[in-house]
Image (cartoon, grey):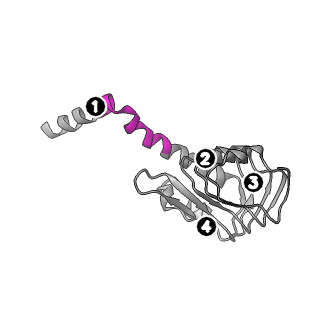
Amino acid sequence: MGKVWIIVLVSVLLLMFFPDKCISMTTSNFTDQSALLAFKAHITFDPPNILAHNWSSKTSFCDWIGISCNVRGQRVTALNLPDMGLIGTIPPQLGNLSFPQFLNISNDSFHGYLPSEIGNLHRLKSIDVQANNFTGLIPESFGNLSNVQLVTLATNSLTGI
């Protein structure tokens, strides 16, 4: 019984003196998972059924195919799903990912517009959405992506900027 009280006491003290450290990891993990599940929900066709079978809330999203996470904070650093034959749209919630550096959904069949919320991904270094069916304006918010070194938008029907 004594060990249990020590664990409870230490937990309470950590929450009292370091609430941002204790809560932020849980919040960011939940935010990343929610963003990825919203992305999955916008996939209308998944020929190899990889997302249907592998992307489950029963497992850590860091173990999902096409997802890379940093080791320390368990936050998404890359969404890498090229050449999978995926059909769908990109939800605005994708802009809620906390630390992505690489986004590659090239050579699939995504359509619709690119959501302006992608401009919220300030750590993004590379975005490759070539060879899809995106239409409309390139979001002005792409100008917020100050760390981007590579943007590949070719073979879409995008206009602007």
- Label disc, if present, on residue 126 of the rendered structure: none
Q: Where residue 50 is drawn, which disc sits there?
A: 4
Q: Which residues are magenta?
A: 13-28
Quarter occupied by the N terminus: top left
Disc 1: which residue: 12
Q: Amino acid at mark 4?
A: Ile
Contact between labelled residues 2 and 4, with CB atoms less than 8 Å apart: no
Query: Is 17 contained in the magenta span?
Result: yes
Tell me the amino acid under the disc marked 3: Thr
Looking at the picture, how far across and down is residue 81, in whole percent? 64, 65
Of badges 3 and 2, the one in the foreground is 2
Label disc, if present, on residue 89 of the rendered structure = 3
Q: Residue at x 48, y 40 (%)?
A: 27
Whether the magenta-drawn stretch holds residue 4 is answered as: no
Foreground pick, 89 / 134: 134
Camera-side mark, 1 or 4 = 1
Residue at horizontal 69 percent and vertical 71 percent from the top: 83
The local crowd at label 1, few if under 14, some if 14 to 19, many if 20 or more residues have their Cα within 10 Å, is: few
- 1 vs 2, front mark: 2
- Real-space Cα distance between discs 4 and 2? 28 Å
